[in-house]
Image: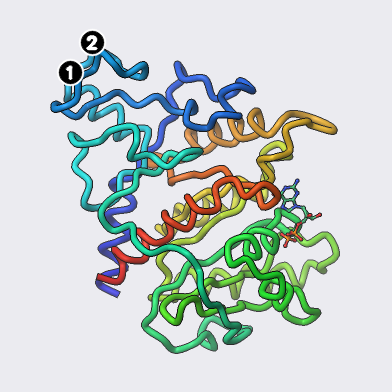
Amino acid sequence: MVLLLRYRSLTINLTPLLIPKSHSFHTLQSFRNPKNLISIPRISSSSSSSNNPTTTTNRSISDAAKFAKSVLFVPPGVEIEELTDDMVLPGSNIVIGPFAGHSQIKEVEFVKSSARARDCPKDDRPEIAILGRSNVGKSSLINCLVRKKEVALTSKKPGKTQLINHFLVNKSWYIVDLPGYGFAKVSDAAKTDWSAFTKGYFLNRDTLVCVLLLIDASVPPQKIDLDCANWLGRNNVPMTFVFTKCDKMKATKGKRPDENIKAFQQIIRENFKVHPPWILTSSVSGLGRDELLLHMSQLRNYWDQ
Ligand code: GDP
């Protein structure tokens, strides 16, 4: 519990994200090359600024550090003065630090479905929960991460969709598949149950390292996602926004993913003093898969130390 609180406070203090208005987040080109989403001033005093196209030559080190800190998720163990742009995961605002380690999933086993937080496995191993609106692409992302189809299928079986499903990964940590919210077919009573028991999980699960809040990049910002993000933020639950379906470059109706993401980020910026880390993914193309796993490894390893 002590570790968790320490992690939480660091997350809160070290993850300010403000996508500066001056930085283009909406052009197709910048979206295709996610590294262009953020331009990081080179603030390492040892590196020459003149050969780096992203350099802001007139900034002092402290200005550059402040700027970088306001844009990026800087994990524990990284000195802001030592930041260079190659430490940022492509397609994200996430800096990779010394706690990042072994991230690939070799083995995964379904452990348990629980109807209440207190029924979850009694275990000290860290866990990362995955949450999102129904149809956001949660099962696809879990399958993509673990590279096994049957895993997320397990939790899609009738009767298990409204349960907390624990999967043990590499015998060392858990992926927790939480019920999708915003089910059109679920009755109001079931919706109330969902929030009561899922909220209980967030508030009482001492081993919860972080919530991956999945946001469908192929649709404009949804109130229900923003409500969820705001609730997690108010309750100091560490979260990472995982934008899904980022391969859908041609909008069938409405706006393109890059425009939807930009709109979502703007709303979050208005609501949050401190903005969580974010990453672009696609379960179809595999975009962001390895990067997300690496991010998860550094969160876990720091929590676990
Ligand atoms: P869940 O209800 O959140 O578990 O969502 P699913 O994983 O079942 O996905 C819902 C729909 O979105 C399915 O038709 C998927 O094929 C589609 N989908 C999921 N992920 C992606 C993605 O990365 N790209 C695209 N283009 N479609 C996706």
Residue 227 percent across, percent down from the top left: 60, 50
Q: Which residue is mark 2?
A: 58
Q: Residue at x 22, y 46 (%)?
A: 78
Identify the image quadrant of the C terminus: bottom left
- Quadrant placement of the N terminus: bottom left
- How far across and down, in percent of the image, does residue 304 sit? 30, 71
Query: How far apart, in angstroms, are the residues tagged by discs 1 and 2?
Result: 7 Å
Q: Position of residue 43 (x, y in %)?
A: 22, 27
The image shows residue 74 at horizontal and vertical percentages of 31, 44
Element type at mark 2 = loop
Which quadrant contains ligand 1?
bottom right
The correct choice, above or below, for 160 with respect to 79 in the image is below
The residue that appears at 44% across and 89% down in the rendered structure is 122
Amino acid at dot 2: Asn
Disc 1: which residue: 60
Can residue 299 be seen from the camera position used here? yes
